Image: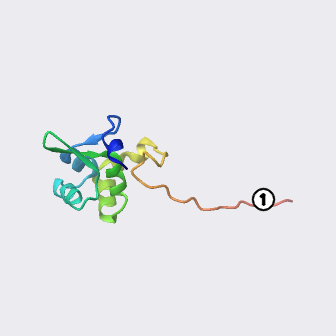
Amino acid sequence: MNKESIEDPQHIRVSVSEAARLFGVSSKTIRRALQDQELRYIVVRGRYKILFASLVHWSQQAVSVQRRRDQRGIGQWVERWRLHAPLYSPRPPQPRPNIRRTTKST
């Protein structure tokens, strides 16, 4: 992602506290991810504005963050919303098992 795309006004950006609430983690966890350069952000009037897409990607990387996201964050509502588009779902798509059904002929 280049600098021009990160500053595009159509991107959804959230504050540190909003990100923490949405993903069920502490603000300290979000700030640690910012410090470790795991999240994409811009600074607006001295405050971090984090790209929502980078938060979703980040939340899919660590099992502990996935669990918190699914138990206390936005993941707890995903099944109710029936989000199936992998681009917008906080859960990465899971491969579907191949099930072959056979019919008996009589």
**Residue 21, relative to residue 36: is it above or below?**
above
Task: Return the x and y of residue 10 as percentages of the image width and height.
Answer: 35, 35
Provide the residue designation for mark 1. 103
Q: Residue at 32% across / 39% down in the picture?
A: 12
User: Where is residue 96, by image quadrant?
Assistant: bottom right
101 or 4: nearer the eye?
4
Q: What is the count of numbered marks?
A: 1
Q: How is the image coloured?
A: rainbow
**Residue 78, relative to residue 99: is it above or below?**
above
46 or 102: nearer the eye?
46
- Dot 1 amino acid type: Thr
Q: In the rendered view, does 17 fall on the left or right side of 74?
A: left
Task: Return the x and y of residue 4 as percentages of the image width and height.
Answer: 34, 42
Q: Residue at 19% across / 48% down in the picture?
A: 16
Task: Return the x and y of residue 69 as percentages of the image width and height.
Answer: 31, 54
> Residue lying furthest right in this view?
106
Crowdedness near tag 1: few (<14), some (14–19) or many (≥20) residues, C-alpha within 10 Å: few
Q: Please, what secondary structure does the residue beneath circle 1 have?
A: loop
Q: In the rendered view, does 56 fall on the left or right side of 42?
A: right
> Residue lying furthest left in this view?
46
Q: In the rendered view, does 88 fall on the left or right side of 40?
A: right
81 or 55: nearer the eye?
55
Task: Return the x and y of residue 36 as percentages of the image width and height.
Answer: 23, 62
Q: Residue at 42% across / 45% down in the picture?
A: 88
48 or 57: nearer the eye?
48
Instruction: Identify the image quadrant of the C terminus.
Output: bottom right
> Residue lying furthest top in this view?
9
Q: In the rendered view, does 87 fall on the left or right side of 74?
A: right
